[in-house]
Amino acid sequence: MLRNVIVFLSSVLLIASCETLQITQSWKLDPQPSSGMKSILVMGLNRESDRSLLFEMEKHLSEDLRGRGYNASSALSVFGPHYFDRLSEQEALNKLQQSGYDAVLTIVMLDKDKERHYVPGRVMYTPYVFYYNRFWGYRTVLVQRVYEPGYYVSDTKYFWETNLYSLREAQLLLFSAQSKSFEPGTASAFGHQYARSMIVRMVEQGVLK
């Protein structure tokens, strides 16, 4: 019985550790344009250092959108990292429309925030009467607490925003979502999770078919 409980709790913790993303708020235009969308470019807007993560996010969002019947592609894959930097607004819009896109889905990292907290690891708390009044007992417990896995760690929180713009409707904002996440385990796993969460939210709100 105890073994089954331990296995169950371990599974719950594993699932929880994989779910690093939380959508904090979202908005959609109501009513949505009747023209709909067929071709969507997914475009990340972050710094050079975040490019590998953004590529995975673009790739997974594009794949999930294609799975729902849209012609979707990653801006990094199609145009590269700096293509639009040298274009004016009108030149960029003309290029997107000439390429057949009728919507752009943007991803941007709004902020990073380091958070410091205590993770106990394997050492359990012992009431002070058992070790505070004896130097060696105190030293032994505290050395374990400092050097065993855990102790004080710094996690990084990421704050994201994803917007969907229609190119048919004068760059009209159709959908916006803000979310937060912790340090991703791998870029690919986080990209998959981010894409799934955004697609589900847009389907729930009637933005995607």
Image: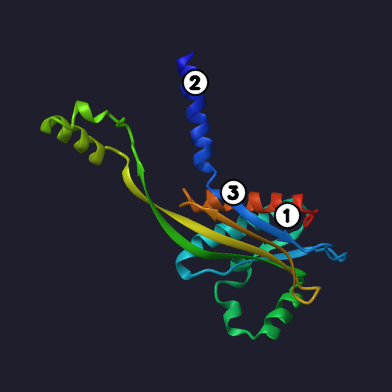
Residue 143: give x, y in percent of width and height.
Answer: 19, 37
Q: Which residue is mark 1?
A: 202
In depth, the one of 82 and 89 nearer the eye is: 89
Is residue 202 depicted above or below 79 in this figure? Answer: above
Marks 2 and 3: which is nearer the front? 2
- Which secondary structure, mark 3? helix
Q: Of the numbered discs in the image, which one, if any, rests on residue 121?
A: none
Give whichever of discs 3 and 1 has the lower sequence position: 3
Instruction: Give the residue drawn at x 61%, y 52%.
Output: 23
Q: What's the CA distance linking mark 2 and mark 3? A: 27 Å
Residue 57: give x, y in percent of width and height.
Answer: 58, 57
Q: Is residue 140 left or right of residue 5?
A: left
Judge the density around disc 2: few (<14), some (14-19), many (≥20) Cα neighbours within 10 Å. Answer: few
Residue 50: give x, y in percent of width and height.
Answer: 48, 64
Instruction: Give the residue drawn at x 78%, y 64%.
Output: 29
Q: Is residue 116 left or right of residue 171?
A: left
Q: Which residue is mark 3?
A: 193
Q: Of the numbered discs in the image, which one, if any, rests on residue 5?
A: 2
In depth, the one of 126 and 197 nearer the eye is: 126
Judge the density around disc 3: few (<14), some (14-19), many (≥20) Cα neighbours within 10 Å. Answer: some
Q: Residue furthest left?
A: 135
Judge the density around disc 1: few (<14), some (14-19), many (≥20) Cα neighbours within 10 Å. Answer: some
Q: What's the CA distance linking mark 1 and mark 2? A: 37 Å
Q: Is residue 11 left or right of residue 98?
A: left
Q: Amino acid at mark 1?
A: Met
Residue 20: give x, y in percent of width and height.
Answer: 52, 47
> Does the CB distance between marks 3 and 1 fall below 8 Å?
no
In depth, the one of 165 and 43 nearer the eye is: 165
- Which secondary structure, mark 2? helix
Q: Amino acid at mark 3?
A: Gln
